[in-house]
Every structure is written in structure tokens, then in C-alpha cells.
């Protein structure tokens, strides 16, 4: 199996505060990893490090073959990120947001209508500026962007937040499709009952380090680390 | 770089056309400023004609600060800016795209202000070529400096007060060269327009070059 993520004693700081205090994590490509932990455990910081948005202060790390101690700008094009914030232009329609981001990533925009339809953004909702949509609808648009971009690495920060039951099922099926297509998925969550069944690997974080690792409930998973 | 510039310029202009903040807030402010200047200088035609170039450029510079803040605000929330960083856009292309969008908006403003100049200040233009050249060169310099200093000015909560303090002193050469160019272009004006148009051209080139080189590192930090 090809390594997608390899972190050894990874340390990252925010100002002078160590948000990651020596993380060890190894994931193969195509793995779905759930990251659990209390507020302030370092879950979001881990995702930002993996996306190349936060610098690796000490330790070693590589993501999709890119060395995190060097310039990570080349890594970003292979990463899809769903953070706490919406990350969309409020005045633009869902289709216009996706069109800008897909073209910026130098991808084919012809898949945008299917991606929006896949996440249930249709009709009147699709013709409404993103800023006027509900929080759940906005997160569906972000999910559509990931579906359209098909990145090699999916990083999702509490993807089920603000979503109703139907939308939560949708997230699960989209993540399953992504993993089946060979993408690596790392998702943080405060809802273990929802996310563990979707995952091959579950890690728990506390104090900026990984404290526990065990197999998830995804069919066919057999994490032996 | 140019492909990304076209994409970003299109995005900024589409957002602006959809929100109409420039149309309903910034442009009216600019015209209002010129109108108030005209009232302040009284009905004396001679005084109005003499002061017209300076007041035009003052109205333009103060309006540029509003345009600069609006241009920066178009980048969206911190989450949106991070999402854009993950797209792999060339920072120089982003800078150029925002500069082009802001340049076009400033040209529209300059047209309005020139019309105001003709109607309120009773200015007679002798050389339209000099006037148009001054406006276009200045718009490019103002746009590039505004986008660059917008990136330098930081987050929204301090940008509203910090950006004017940073930007206005930098724009002083545009004010001086613009006024001199306009004086050469209108009746009863004087001066060698070529030298001052050269100052505007150099200013534009310098800040466009600085922006291409520095926008990326400023955004990363």
C-alpha cells in the first residue's frame, strides 16, 4: 500500500503555543480515518497541517509525497478541505462558486451540475446566492465542491455539523465513494456514533498528540497498526 | 499567471455587479465629495476653475481608499481566503486580477468625476489626450497600490483605520502629478504634461511590479 500521510513527532505552533505536540500518524492511500477528541485536542490543527496551511515546526512529515518541511504550496491542489467556516463567496450562486474554484484548480467544470445534484442542491436553492442559504445548505455546496474536485486527500472538520439526518447519510455515502475511488479521507468529529462506522481507522487526540488508535467499523477495514 | 488574473478579475467584477456596493455606496460618495467641494469654494468661476484639478484628485484619492477596502473585502472571510489558497492560484495572477478589476472600477469613477468637473466647475478641456492619459495611468497606479496595501493592512477589524493611514501618504505622488497633468489639460492651465505623465507611469510600473513580487508572501503571512 502507498503511504498517503506520514507524521513523526510532528509539532506545529500557533504563535508560541504548541497546537500539535508530537503527532505520530501513518495512513495509507484510500484509508478513511476518523479523528476524535475534546475541544482543543488539536484535531483542527492536524487537518490544517495536513493541508499545508500550517507550518511543521519540528519533526518530520509527508503528505501525498510532499515534504511538509519544505514549500507546501504544491500539495494544496491535491487537497480538499471542509473547515468550520463556509469558505464560499456569499454573493455568488453555488454554481458560480464551484465554477470559479474548479477553473482555478485547472479542472474540467463540466461535472459541476452533477456534483450539485449529487448533494441535493437544485432548483430554487441552486439559484440563490450562497450567503442566503442555510448553514446546512452551505455545507452541502462545500461538499459538492469536493465531489467536483475529486482531490486525492479529503480533510473534513466536523462534516456532520449543521446537517439533518438525510444530509448526514449523504456525507457518509459521498465519503464512501471518495474512498472507493482511492482518495484518502481524514474527518474530525464530536459524534463517534456517526463517524466510527464510516472509518477504517480511528485515532483519538488529546493535548496535541495522538493517544489511541484502533480499527473503525467500515466494511472490510483491518487496521493492524 | 494571466489565466488566473482573468479568473480573479471576473470573480471580483461579478461579485461587485451582484452586490452593487460600489454602485450604490462608493460612487455616490465620490460625486457627493466633489459637489461639496464645489459648494465650499463658492460661485466664483475663476476660483472653481483654478481649484478644479486639485479637488478632482482629492475626491479620487479619498474614494480610492473606499475602493481599496471594498476590493480587500471581496476576498471574503478567513475561511474563504483559506479555501482560495488551496486552489493553487498564482499569487501574482491574483494580484493582477484584483488590480484589473479595481482599475476598471476606478475608470468608471473617473468618467463620473470628469463629467462633474465639466458641469460643476465649468472647466474647459484643451487637451483630452493628456487628461485621458493621466486618468488611465493614475487608475492603474491607484489600483495596484490599493491591492498591495490592502494585503498589507491585515484583518478586517483594523483594516478600516489602518488602510487609509498606510495608503494615502503613498498616493501623494499621484495627487501631485495628477493635478499638474490636469492643469496642463484644461484651459488657463500651465505646465509640461509629459513630465507629470511620466511620474504617473513610473508610479504605476513600480507598484505593479512590487505587487507581483510581494502579494504572494504577504498573503502567506
Image (cartoon, coloured by chain):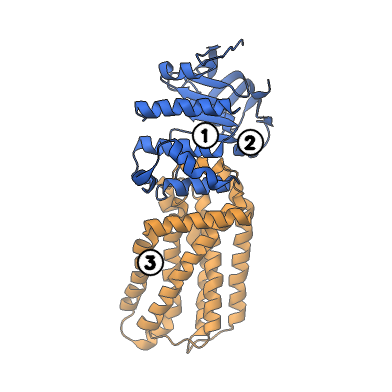
Chain colours: A blue, B orange
Residue B213 spot, x, y in % from top left? 64, 53
User: Badge 1 local density, few (<14 within 10 Å), some, or many (20+)?
Assistant: many
Q: Are marks 2 and 3 on the same chain?
A: no
Quick one: B2 or B91, which is closer to the camera? B2
User: Badge 2 local density, few (<14 within 10 Å), some, or many (20+)?
Assistant: many
Q: Residue at x 49, y 54 (%)?
A: B11
Quadrant showing the C terminus of chain A: top right
A186 is higher (above) or lower (below) than B170: above
Disc nearer the start of the sequence (2/1): 2
Dot 2 and dot 1 residues touching (CB under 8 Å) = no
| Chain under numbered label 2 | A
Residue A80 spot, x, y in % from top left? 54, 35
B61 is higher (above) or lower (below) than B95: below
Tell me the residue that label 1 is attached to: A81
Quadrant showing the N terminus of chain A: top right
Tell me the residue that label 2 is attached to: A75
User: Badge 3 local density, few (<14 within 10 Å), some, or many (20+)?
Assistant: many
Q: Quadrant of residue A191?
A: top left
| Chain under numbered label 1 | A
B25 is higher (above) or lower (below) than A68: below
Instruction: Give the left or right position of residue B210, taking residue B10 as reference.
Output: right
Alpha carbon distance from label 2 to label 3: 42 Å
Q: Secondary structure at mark 2?
A: loop
Quick one: B170 or A87, which is closer to the camera? A87
Q: Are marks 1 and 3 on the same chain?
A: no
Mark carried by residue B27: 3
A80 is higher (above) or lower (below) than B47: above
Instruction: Give the left or right position of residue B80, taking residue A122 as reference.
Output: right
Residue B221 visible in the shown view: no
Amino acid at each position: 500500500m502507498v503511504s498517503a500521510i506520514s507524521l513523526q513527532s510532528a509539532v506545529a505552533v500557533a504563535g508560541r503555543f504548541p497546537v500539535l505536540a508530537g503527532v505520530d500518524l501513518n495512513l495509507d492511500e484510500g484509508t478513511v480515518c476518523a479523528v476524535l477528541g475534546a475541544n482543543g485536542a488539536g484535531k483542527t490543527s492536524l487537518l490544517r497541517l495536513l493541508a499545508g496551511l500550517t507550518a511543521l515546526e519540528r519533526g518530520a512529515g509527508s503528505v501525498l509525497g510532499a515534504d511538509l518541511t519544505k514549500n507546501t504550496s504544491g500539495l494544496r491542489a491535491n487537497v480538499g478541505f471542509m473547515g468550520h467556516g463556509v469558505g464560499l463567496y456569499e454573493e455568488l450562486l453555488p454554481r458560480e462558486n464551484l465554477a470559479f474554484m474548479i477553473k482555478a484548480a485547472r479542472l474540467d467544470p463540466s461535472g459541476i451540475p452533477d456534483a450539485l445534484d449529487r448533494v441535493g442542491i437544485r432548483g430554487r436553492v441552486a439559484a440563490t446566492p450562497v450567503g442566503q442559504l442555510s448553514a446546512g445548505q452551505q455545507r452541502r455546496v462545500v461538499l459538492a465542491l469536493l465531489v467536483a474536485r475529486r482531490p486525492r486527500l479529503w480533510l473534513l472538520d466536523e462534516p456532520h455539523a449543521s446537517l439533518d439526518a438525510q444530509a448526514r447519510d449523504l456525507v457518509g455515502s459521498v465519503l464512501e465513494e471518495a474512498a472507493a475511488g482511492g482518495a484518502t479521507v481524514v474527518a474530525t468529529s464530536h459524534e463517534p456514533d456517526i463517524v466510527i462506522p464510516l472509518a477504517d481507522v480511528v485515532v483519538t487526540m488529546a493535548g496535541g498528540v495522538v493517544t489511541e488508535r484502533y480499527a473503525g467499523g467500515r466494511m472490510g477495514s483491518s487496521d493492524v497498526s | 499567471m494571466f489565466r488566473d488574473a482573468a479568473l480573479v478579475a471576473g470573480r471580483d467584477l461579478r461579485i461587485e455587479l451582484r452586490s452593487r456596493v460600489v454602485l450604490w455606496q462608493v460612487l455616490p460618495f465620490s460625486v457627493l465629495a466633489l459637489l461639496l467641494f464645489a459648494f465650499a469654494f463658492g460661485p466664483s468661476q475663476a476660483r472653481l476653475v483654478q481649484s478644479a484639478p486639485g479637488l478632482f484628485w482629492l475626491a479620487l484619492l479619498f474614494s480610492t481608499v473606499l475602493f481599496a477596502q471594498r476590493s480587500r473585502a471581496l476576498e471574503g472571510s478567513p475561511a474563504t481566503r483559506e479555501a482560495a489558497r488551496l486552489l493553487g492560484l498564482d499569487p501574482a495572477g491574483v494580484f493582477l486580477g484584483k488590480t484589473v478589476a479595481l482599475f476598471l472600477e476606478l475608470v468608471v469613477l473617473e468618467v463620473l468625476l470628469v463629467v462633474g468637473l465639466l458641469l460643476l466647475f465649468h472647466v474647459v478641456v484643451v487637451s483630452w489626450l493628456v487628461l485621458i492619459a493621466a486618468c488611465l495611468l493614475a487608475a492603474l497606479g491607484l489600483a495596484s497600490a490599493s491591492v498591495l496595501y490592502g494585503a498589507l493592512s491585515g484583518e478586517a477589524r483594523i483594516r478600516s483605520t489602518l488602510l487609509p493611514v498606510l495608503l494615502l501618504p503613498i498616493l501623494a505622488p499621484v495627487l501631485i502629478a495628477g493635478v499638474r497633468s490636469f492643469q496642463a489639460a484644461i484651459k488657463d492651465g500651465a505646465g509640461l504634461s509629459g513630465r507629470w505623465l511620466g511620474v504617473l507611469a513610473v508610479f504605476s510600473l513600480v507598484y505593479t511590479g512590487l505587487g507581483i513580487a510581494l502579494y504572494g508572501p504577504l498573503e502567506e503571512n
